[in-house]
Amino acid sequence: MAFETILFETEGPLAIITVNRPKALNALSPQVVGELEQAIKDIRDSDDIRAVILTGAGDKAFIAGADIAAMSKMSPLEGRAFSRYGQDVLFSLEKLPQPVIAAVNGFALGGGCEIAMACDFIYAADSAKFGQPEINLGIIPGFGGTQRLSRLVGKGWAKELCLTGAIIGADQAAAIGLVTRVFPAEELMEAAKKTALGMAAKGRVSLRAIKELIDNGYDMSLERAIPMEAENFATCFASPDQAEGMTAFLEKRKPDFKGGLND
Ligand code: CAA
């Protein structure tokens, strides 16, 4: 599929998705969401892509939210369908077996903040700005914001951001745990690539298990979640990555992990 609103590039084991509507601050139109859905499927089915970076074109915005022009004439039924569609695509992003970094290079508002939160973690330029300003449009977050934000930063900050529509800077976002690291804007992509390449070189069975355990276990009781870890720990011993990782340690060399995604 040829993409018109996103760029899909690969650099060795990395896939870089860039939402590419800079004149509309990379707003998420239904077409963008559809193209993201396809790109996510392509990545999921690829045996060569081992880590992913999601970013926005230009230096002003990561993604300034769902496309307000496209939403302005929606009926309640269309609004629900758009919300459910966006939620499903963000679930498919969150459930990718490969690790995904959001490289937030400017405004990450509304759906932009929501898509960043569906990535595994967020790196931000010092110029980045975050918020859930839907309240100012007479609506609420629709791509998971009321749920993922509170899970990431706690109920107090989630309520303050969603109820007031306040926009916060990168340092504040890092202080509340929304962002893991902040970089000078010109260093953001290199830093994201370095971390993504580092993860790409790890064992894929381990990467996938860690993602699934942290995501799935988060909403479970500790008593139910902890045993899942033992099962996944056991599965690692059926992967060639475990033999390679431990042999390499004992032989005092770097491991060369080759395990497939479906091992
Ligand atoms: N949808 C559609 N177009 C958008 C947009 C959006 N979310 N955000 C910005 N744009 C467009 C503007 O309409 C403008 O287009 P024109 O040049 O054709 O007029 C262009 O991008 C540049 O934007 P501004 O002129 O507004 O730039 P600014 O620097 O003055 O302001 C901003 C930047 C503060 C980010 C401002 O654009 C803004 O507030 N954008 C909307 C943010 C927002 O409310 N996001 C939430 C959307 S709802 C949502 O996401 C629901 C959900 O959960 C799924």
Image (cartoon, helix red, strand yellow):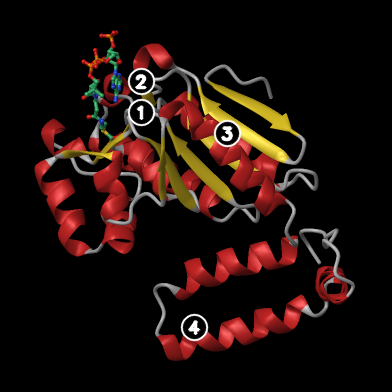
Q: Which residue is identified by label 2?
A: 60
Q: Is mark 2 within 8 Å of ligand 1?
A: yes
Disc nearer the start of the sequence (3/1): 1
**Residue at (55% x, 40% y) in the render:** 192
**Residue at (40% x, 39% y) in the render:** 124
Check disc 3 and report its element: helix, strand or loop. helix
Comparing marks 2 and 3, which lies closer to the viewer?
3
Amino acid of disc 3: Glu
Q: Which residue is identified by label 4?
A: 225
Disc nearer the start of the sequence (1/4): 1
> Separation of disc 4 and disc 2 at Cα?
41 Å
Comparing marks 4 and 2, which lies closer to the viewer?
2
Is disc 1 in contact with disc 2, using a CB cutoff of under 8 Å? yes
Left or right of 193 on screen, residue 152 = left
Disc nearer the start of the sequence (3/4): 3
Disc nearer the start of the sequence (4/2): 2
**Residue 139 versus residue 63: which sits nearer the camera?**
63
Q: Is residue 43 shown above or below 127?
A: below
> Separation of disc 1 and disc 4 at Cα?
36 Å
Amino acid of disc 2: Lys
